[in-house]
Image (tube, rainbow, N blue to C red):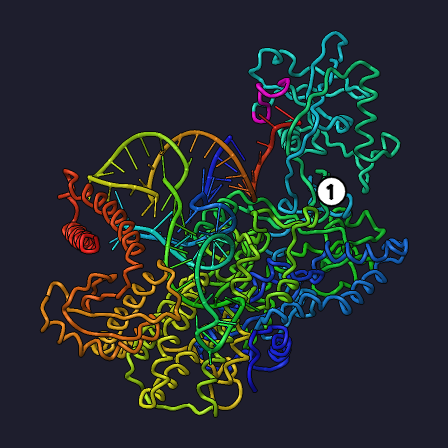
Amino acid sequence: MPLDKIYDPSKVEEKWATHWAESAEFQANPQSDQPAFSMVIPPPNVTGSLHLGHALNTTLQDILARYKRMKGFNVLWVPGTDHAGIATQNVVERQLAKESISRHDIGRRAFIEKVWDWKKTSGGTIISQLKRLGASCDWSRERFTLDEGLSKAVSDVFIRLYQEGLLYRDKRLINFCFRCQTALSDIEVEHEETNGKMYHIKYPLADGLHYLIVATTRPETMLADTAVAVHPEDDRYNSLIGKEIALPLTDRTIPIVGDPILVDREFGTGAVKITPGHDFNDEAVGKRHQLDIISLFDSRGRIALLNNLPIFEARADVVKQLEAQELLIKIEDHRHAIGVCYRCKTVVEPTLSTQWFVRMNDPKNSLVKPAIDAVNNGEIRLIPDAWKNNYLGWMENIQDWCISRQIWWGHKIPAWYCHGSDKDQCQLICNQPIVAATPPTKCPHCGSTDLRQDTDVLDTWFSSALWPFSTLGWPEETPLLKKFYPTTTLISGFDILFFWVARMIMMGLHFTKQVPFQDVYIHALVRDAQGQKMSKSKGNVINPLEIMERYGTDALRFTLASMASPGRDINLSENRIEGYRNFANKIWNATRFILMNMPNGEVPNAPSQNPADVWIRLRLNETIQSVESAMDRYRMDEAAETLYQFVWHEYCDWYLELSKVTLQANETREGTIATMRSVFSDILALLHPFMPFITAELSPDFSQGSYPTDKALSFPKSDPAFSSHPDSVATAASVQVLIATISEIRNRRGEMNIPPSEKMSLLIGGTSAAGGASAADSKEDAIANYLPYIKRLAGIETVTFGSASPKFSSHFENGWGTFHLLLDEARIKKEIERLTKVLQKTEKELDGLQSRLNAPDFIKAPAEVQETLHLRLREISQKKDQVIAQLSKME
RNA sequence: GGGCGGAUAGCUCAGUCGGGAGAGCGGCGGCCUUACAAGCCGUAGGUCACAGGUUCGAUCCCUGUUCCGCCUACCA
């Protein structure tokens, strides 16, 4: 079936995506004795839909997976999704809101059912999009963080951490999002610079005579103040330490304390209101001075003391009251960072609350220390390693991790509390949670059967921290776990380095006593062409599915791969994608050309000695080696670029063009077809990890029978014996001279605008170094083989050999001799112009070189450097002499 | 405040044992040379952010400055 003239990805991609998703060829085999290679996908949110971050992440993993598979590894790539507690709950709540229903209206059980329903109908979107991208995951092993097995792992880990004292429940200040109605961990709070106000407020002393001025950005919290702090060495205030303040708007008095740690004498007024119930710093001050803690907000962020006003209205109200009492000195503009919820961007409030925490700062460093060591000693490699310092810095300052969330969608906390009535018997003990895998039937202390499970669920990141081993069956000793754990490589974006990667390292080391992965490849963010972060509000979001539609999935994949240079964000520009779409078309048309020359699908098997065939095989070998070297260093960008250059600018531009000569002659034809086909077949294989669709589509044309699966399709091997053989090397060198010769002639034709249709004449003489007619004769034989190539590719009709030096010609020299491109008199003016330009350039280059060589201390440079520079000097001055000779001859 | 990354052609980006600056796109000129006009051939275009330093020699190493991005932090 003849191929279309233009490659249309939409005609083939769907077919292959479906084929890969349904076939068993990517299923890993725990019984195989091939070397294992394993990865787990960073599970996208089940609510997700494909964005460019997913596309990049998945493409890089797929390239690696397919590459390793073709290299003979037993590859396991585990796919799956994350239940994404808050995000998913938000989605379903929004749906209910359309019917004016809140989750509380229908209750917890019914709501959870709704979420599962939603998951069943809509949760597969992201997975099918990953499949559409060509991801060669083992889809038979798809996991979900709320699967039974994974939930068992979560429960086990929770219980063990509790038993080891690494998990505790405590009433502490935590970040609370009143919109999501839940506590958040530290890193779930984003800091946003905003223009706020700084309020200066008069705080009268209890004696009624003096006052202090405090400065605050959150005046409404003053209702929960329990002290004012000053610096003990601040002469303005230190005599007041120990005195009392009559806190305005309340009937309370609060002490003035001296605290050198918190108070900065230079900032604000040097006197700080202390609100331990709503500020992390103040909480610390409160601990140091045994201050009371007052909580202002109810669970919805309203202040009971102010008629249940929400925070921002309460602020306005407080300001109004202060003004009325003439206690407000001034309001200044003030730029500062406020914390917002990473899910809904609502301002979060530090709030006193009882929550579960993972202890990071335990004296034995059980979780943190091993995770630091593993990266320090290279057991886990971060790539690029610039991330190491970042990682270590964060780990060294890590705080306890708040893991309980007051939402409904997620893993329920396996803890029960006794609500028994016999308070006298075990009043204290019954307040302790009963942590167990299965619901206890009665309180072990008082025997009461009134036990109620903790209503909170766990932070989504708690379950994803176990992902590399929970997906393989842990805590069971499954064959899968044995064969594929620790996983080989993790590919992740830097944005979840702390949310996810660091926690997997801690949990992995603690529970499996092994690293969860050996290499962590950290890729960057995809931005728009101007380097702006893509966001819905800016309207600059590029939808990968739309790109795939317009340019093809291979083009998108190749773009992402080739732009993924380490440590740098990707600014995705559409013209780059278009360029790689053209590349796919180039491959398509190269196929058409080759098939045109093997009309019956017959593949001759004769090895060829045609120079161009030898040359391209040698270059193929070198390309294979470069690609392998790049892949081993996780330089997918380098590998992609190398392939692009080789395929387009060597194989297509030169080799196929040169081959048109040998294809014309019966005695050379077969060998060329064989080489052309086999090299191209290797090219398709080399490109397959990057552009799986088009290569899968075209490969069958170059092999007997049907499309070979990845497992059968092996990565091309380089052939060092052939590459280093003196005959191959010599032939390839000659072809390089041939290419240079053709380029020189084309260059002159181009400058003079001589169209290809106009055939020209060439006179070839001996090299000036050898000189004389005999030298010219000896060259004649050497060049003879190459003349047909020169004629066809450079538009030459007649070639003569001789030592004459024609007056009207453009001339150049190389290893083969002296070439005169014969011109008619009318063109000489153009040639003189060209030569004058060349002369200027040469002189400039010569000057630069001369001055470097003449530098007084240049003798200190290494001998070989001196040598090459002198050599270059000789070459250039020789060239200059030639140009001058040419010019003088023509005048 | 601290830390990290970036600044190279008009645009998007490569480029480390320090020794002649590259690609794609765009521009310009010429070609339907029958695989491909999503193509072919040729060509122009850069004080490698700025200022110092080390060196025989710096896009590359060191110091400082400016601008941009990100992370992080208790300046109320």
Q: How many marks?
A: 1
Q: Is residue A841 left or right of residue A287?
A: left
- Give the x, y percent position of residue B70: 56, 44
Give the main secondary structure of the magenta stretch.
Answer: loop
Residue A699, image x, y percentages: 50, 81
Quarter of the image where the N terminus of chain A is located: bottom right
Identify the residue at image location x=42%, y=65%: A639
Tell which of A416 and A675 is nearer to you. A675
Residue at 72 percent of width and 12 percent of height: A211
Where does label 1 land, which residue?
A346
Residue A283 placement (x, y as % from top left):
66, 33
Left or right: residue A90 compared with residue A816: right
Quarter where residue A325 is shown: top right
- Relative to B49, is A25 on the left or the right? right
Q: Which residues are magenta?
A: A261-270
Q: Is residue A502 visible?
A: yes
The quarter of the displayed image where residue B61 is located: top left
Residue A698 appears at what percent x and percent y? 52, 80
Query: Does A297 appear in magenta?
Result: no
Q: Is residue A159 visible?
A: no
Tag 1 subunit: A
Q: Amino acid at mark 1?
A: Thr
